[in-house]
Amino acid sequence: MKPRKCNEQTLEAVRFHPFFQGVDFRTALSLIKLCELRTFNKQETMLKKDSQRDGLLLLLSGVAEVFVKNDHGTNEEVLEIIQKGELIGFSSLADFLGVAKPGKEAAVHVEVRALEESEALYIPFTVIAKRWGDPDVHDYLLTQVSIRLQDIYASLAEQVKLAHDFGERDAFMLRVHDVMTEKVVCVTPSTTVQEAARLMHEERTSSVLVTHEEKLVGIITERDMVERVIAGGRSLSSKAEEVMTVNPVTISRFSYYYEALSLTLLKGVKHLPVVDGDRLIGVVTLSDLQRKKNENVIRTIQKIEQCTEKTIIHVKKAIYDILDTLIQEKIPMVKTLEIVTQLYDRLVRRAVELSVAALHVEVPCSFALYQMGSAGRGEQFMLTDQDHFLVYEKKEHREYFSKLGVQITATLEKAGYARCKGLMMCSEEKWRGTVEEWQERVRGWMLQSTNDHLLVAQNFFSYRFLTGSSELHEKFEESLKELLQRSKIFLYRLVQVEREHVIPSLDQPIRSLFKLERKSIDMKKEILFPYHHGLQILSLLHGGASGTPLQKLEFLEAKGVFSEEFSSDVRLAVDGILGLYVSKRWQQAAQGKPLHSRIEFARLSTREKEELILSLKTLKELQSQVFAYFTV
């Protein structure tokens, strides 16, 4: 720490801060001269635990974090992040106000350290006392304490939920700023490709970031150099803006490791620029994530990409190992399923590649493969049965796609997917066809809305585009939208089916502490299916068709069907339901017990019961909104 005296220049920097507003210049200057400027190096402790504190710190530049350590100093948890303009040291205000318990003046258990070189203004309690009589200052400090207390409780709740049972902090719980590379190689949009390549070589980096007036506008990777410059025949004098990837995916420095890993899988990128607000502060790569222990995920990706028909069977166990780790680490279930879904998607895409190669014939026209069921919803955590269909461009190539459908189904079976008992697989003639054939098929379900057709349609509309031609996929989606615009009766029939499967209400929370009238609930049939179907119906009603339930939720929020607050509540509810469902089912598999989705209330903790009751209340409200659209 480097302390310095304050002067008029210091006053100019804080003149409009709420603490110094409302006083004349001379008075403000006299107050500022009683304060002290303190400079801290990166990772330097700004406030120590159990030390006497006689003032507050106002952060003028940089970023700091408040954290707690265990008694041995081997484990720590970050409670909150302090940004520029915020105050540090509220835990000592009790001493200033004279309300601290006797003998507890120094019992401060949190510490504060600088995450980067930072400057702070030390404001003694003597100065605070001079301003305490100002109602605006009094209200400002009270508001700041309230906001920070709320943030700390939220942070604690998140970390308690995610932490190990034994309090271990594993790689998944690291923050991005713990794994990122701070040294960032940057160029401007007008920098030549040759200069960018030279910098990449000299700095031994696989990417350069493109910035304009300190704002990130693009990224150039080694792959971009190969595909867009060498293979694309561009001149080395071309400008960086001509070959860069515009508006690259970024991540906050305060995000978790598992969120960075999820983004690399979801977006298919290997370089994530790290930002703090609008400021670029580093980059995290797939290699950085690999070095932080979890190379198991990277090895599994490589195993998928390189597998053959003979070795594809080994991928299943590798993915199961990752799933087990994610569950043990108590990563939020929605994130866990995102990561595992991306691995399964890679596996299915690889199975399609192997199937095409096995036919030893050039693909005659474009096609698209879709998944349905739990795979379509992005909620498949264990390999179950197959649910997929094919769309191809030209009907004269029916024979080729008949063989391809059979081959894909057989290859997936080798990978560990069971054949669908209902034969909803592209190996079956009725689960493949041209866009026109599919349009006619779906029209038939709509016109003859028998119970069987409605059940088939429910599964069909859980579809998600997986691989193949994006152009064909867009054409396919448009053809379905045309049908749906003229098929409100069909949607009404789907709603009638759902009225027979109303999400149950449990008792009030206080009753859950004693005895519930129901003894169990089927998580899949009584909760998840009604939730999925409700989102599905609303999405179809408003012009959306494919995607996972969470993607449909985002679509409906964008359409104004759901408020941002309600969408957030639904996400929390679903995360809780899925967390309970997946963990219980995973335990059954690990113990070699028959798999089922029924949860016995007697086996739930009081907290799990309370969360289940609140989740059901939210999802029941969603279902009620569906019914409200189709009232007679």
Image (spheres, rainbow, N blue to C red):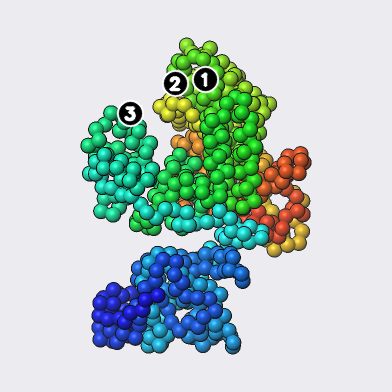
Task: Name the residue nearer the viewer: 323 or 75.
Answer: 75
Q: Marks 1 and 3: CB-CB under 8 Å?
A: no
Residue 249 % position (x, y): 40, 46
What residue is rendered at 53% in x and 73% in y?
110
Q: Earlier in the sequence, mark 1 or mark 2?
A: 1
In three-dimensional space, the C-alpha distance between marks 2 and 3, rounded to whole angstroms, equals 24 Å
Residue shown at 29%/87% (left/top)?
Answer: 30
Q: Residues within 10 Å of mark 2 (few under 14, many from 20)?
A: some
> Where is residue 449 shown, x and y percent of the image?
59, 27
User: Which badge, 2 or 3, is on the more N-terminal residue?
Assistant: 3
Dot label at residue 231 = 3
Label 1 residue SS: helix
Q: Residues within 10 Å of mark 1 (few under 14, many from 20)?
A: few
Which residue has dot 2 on it?
A: 366
Q: Quick check: can you spot residue 110? A: yes
Q: Earlier in the sequence, mark 1 or mark 3?
A: 3
- Residue type (three-letter) at the residue carrying disc 3: Ala
For badge 1, the amino acid type reads Ala
Instruction: Name the front one of labels 1 and 3.
Output: 3
Q: Which residue is mark 1?
A: 357
Q: Examine the image and state in which quarter residue 133 appears.
A: bottom left
The residue furthest front is 202
Q: Position of residue 318 (x, y in %)?
A: 62, 38
